[in-house]
Amino acid sequence: MSKSKTKKAEVPLTRSEIMQRVKQKDTAGELSLRSALHESGLRYRLHRRIEGVMVDVVFVSAKIAIFVDGCFWHGCPIHTTLPKSNQTYWLPKLAENKERDLRQTVRLRAAGWCVIRLWEHECLPTTPKTIRRIQNAVSRHPRNKGSINAR
């Protein structure tokens, strides 16, 4: 007698389940940036908490904090789209994200950090211009002069 396999009906994911799958770390833009930075000879730290702020990419000795902001979540002026459903929830949520970004930038700068915010589209793929911007910031720090391993 053969066993028959019963196939479960696929249940669509709930909004909550969908949102749980959204990455906060190691996004495609962040991975692309990190790869390009490493290829250019720059070494950095990841996901460090500085002044109560979680930073994506950190150059500790140069005091440079880099954020890779998602176009939807942070309101990119080029690619942002408004949610079509449940706007009473989403519009204040997205506005709060922008306000938090500003508070975090102000807090880090007040503590002496250079803050670089990049849109995810600037990192997919990461352009030489973006890498030069970061290299210039790192090389301006007195402790790092001459320490960039440019190839």
Image: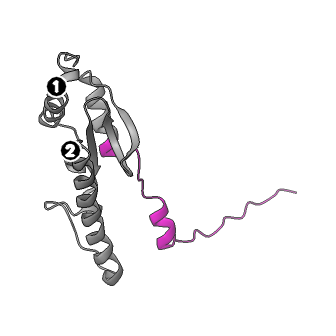
Residue position marked by numbered label 1 in the rendering: 139
Residue occupying image coordinates x 39% and y 37%: 46
Question: Which residue is situated farthest in the right direction here?
Answer: 1
Residue occupying image coordinates x 19% and y 17%: 150
Q: Position of residue 49 (x, y in %)?
A: 40, 45
Marks 1 and 2: CB-CB under 8 Å? no
Residue position marked by numbered label 2 in the rendering: 116
Q: Callout 2: helix, strand or loop?
A: strand
Q: Which secondary structure class fits the magenta region best?
A: loop
Which quadrant, please, contains the N terminus? bottom right
The reply to whether the magenta stretch includes residue 141 is no
Corner quadrant of residue 72: bottom left
Q: Amino acid at mark 1?
A: Ser
Position of 49 compared to 32: left or right?
right
Q: Residues within 10 Å of mark 2 (few under 14, many from 20)?
A: some
Q: How is the image coloured?
A: one colour
The reply to whether the magenta stretch includes residue 8 is yes
Corner quadrant of residue 80: bottom left
Q: Callout 1: helix, strand or loop?
A: helix
Q: Amino acid at mark 2?
A: Ile
> Nearer the N terminus, badge 1 or badge 2?
2
Which quadrant, please, contains the C terminus? top left
Q: Position of residue 23 (x, y in %)?
A: 42, 53
Residue occupying image coordinates x 23% and y 49%: 110
Residue range of the region highlighted in magenta in the rendering: 1-30
Observer-nearest of 44 and 29: 44
Residue occupying image coordinates x 27% and y 48%: 108
Observer-nearest of 34 and 56: 56
